[in-house]
């Protein structure tokens, strides 16, 4: 009875969305035009997927440099509650303050690796540095240790289930600000001089660099491409509009993701349209940008 009611409600909501024209919005679909699934609550059976992923090893890559170290413990503790529960997980945490890391209590089968990384002065460079480190680790360390890698911002907390439904060859997440926008409104890099340039008329979705992932070899290819773009821009003394996120979006125009995560997987409670997002699985921690970046 409860299930029937839920399905009925779901129907009503879909009809409402259709009526308002919202279903025609690409970002609310459950399939991309190249037939990659867009993951929303209710589109998958977690028990079946867990069975398929029996033994799968998953990495979670995160930077916590300078003041951002304050976000690491809450991030990891929330991951212990909600991220890939019951599976083999290796956290790859990078910081300039290795000795200041407070380790959370980890469940069985879960490992925390802490690695030293240089602290770039500008926050933009810290953020972009992640691509360079990814090119090294996806080549040298991770292939033996994990099957899939998930890359995330640290100023986030898991707030609901995030499991193996997000695994795929190449996975990206819809940016919660742009999932209802038309492509020409996306904040792609629009200057032809940048390696991240995407002309108007091109592009499918605007993805947020705070959560993406895939098979280790796919993230290797992705990070090499993005890192090349970042260096090309640096040689010209320019920087893409949204740093590595711009290069990530460029890469994904030409290498379509095989799976797309709905904004359930990247949300900020300050944003409008929250009523469309039933599960808020991975939430931005509100921060004072000025204070934390300087
Ligand atoms: N970051 C960091 N230290 C810094 C700046 C950035 O560790 O001083 C890392 C951290 O993982 C952060 C990510 O880079 O989540 C992206 O930066 P930020 O979250 O500030 O970007 P936003 O989400 O605000 O666009
Ligand atoms: Mn962030």
Image (spheres, rainbow, N blue to C red):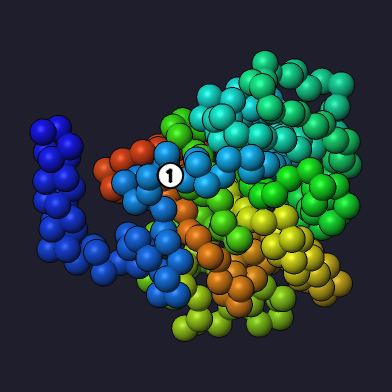
Is residue 164 rendered to the left or right of residue 236?
A: left
Question: Quarter of the image containing the N terminus?
Answer: top left
Label 1 residue SS: helix
Q: Is residue 41 above or below residue 229?
A: above
Q: Position of residue 103 (x, y in %)?
A: 74, 19
Residue linked to disc 1: 48
Is residue 147 rendered to the left or right of residue 178?
A: right
Q: Position of residue 131 (x, y in %)?
A: 76, 56
Dividing the picture into quarters, in which one does residue 30 lie?
bottom left
Residue at (51% x, 55% y) in the render: 173
Q: Is residue 277 above or below residue 16?
A: above
Is residue 13 rendered to the left or right of residue 50?
A: left
Closer to us: 189 or 289:
189
Q: Position of residue 236 (x, y in %)?
A: 82, 74
Can residue 223 be seen? no
Residue at (56% x, 51% y) in the render: 167
Is residue 43 rendered to the left or right of residue 150?
A: left
């Amino acid at each position: 009875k409860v299930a029937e009611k839920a399905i009925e409600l779901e129907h009503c909501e879909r009809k409402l969305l259709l009526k308002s024209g919202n279903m025609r919005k690409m970002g609310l679909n459950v399939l991309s035009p190249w037939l990659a699934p867009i993951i929303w609550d209710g589109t998958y059976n977690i028990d079946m997927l867990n069975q398929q992923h029996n033994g799968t090893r998953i990495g979670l890559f995160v930077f916590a440099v300078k003041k951002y170290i304050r976000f690491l413990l809450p991030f990891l503790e929330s991951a212990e509650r909600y991220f890939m529960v019951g599976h083999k997980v290796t956290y790859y945490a990078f910081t300039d303050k290795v000795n200041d890391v407070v380790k959370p209590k980890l469940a069985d089968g879960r490992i925390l690796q802490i690695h030293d990384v240089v602290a770039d002065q500008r926050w933009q460079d810290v953020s972009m540095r992640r691509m360079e480190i990814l090119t090294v680790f996806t080549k040298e360390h991770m292939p033996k240790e994990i099957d899939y890698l998930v890359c995330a911002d640290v100023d986030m907390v898991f707030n609901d289930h995030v499991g193996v439904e997000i695994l795929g060859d190449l996975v990206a997440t819809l940016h919660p600000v742009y999932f209802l926008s038309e492509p020409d409104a996306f904040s792609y890099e629009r200057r032809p001089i940048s390696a991240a340039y995407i002309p108007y008329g091109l592009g499918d979705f605007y993805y947020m660099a705070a959560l993406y992932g895939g098979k280790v070899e796919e993230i290797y290819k992705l990070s090499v491409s993005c890192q090349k773009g970042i260096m090309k821009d640096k040689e010209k003394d320019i920087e893409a509009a949204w740093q590595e996120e711009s290069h990530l979006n460029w890469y994904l125009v030409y290498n379509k993701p095989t799976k797309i995560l709905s904004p359930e997987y990247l949300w900020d409670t300050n944003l409008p349209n929250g009523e469309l997002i039933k599960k808020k699985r991975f939430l931005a921690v509100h921060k004072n940008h000025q204070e934390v970046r300087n």
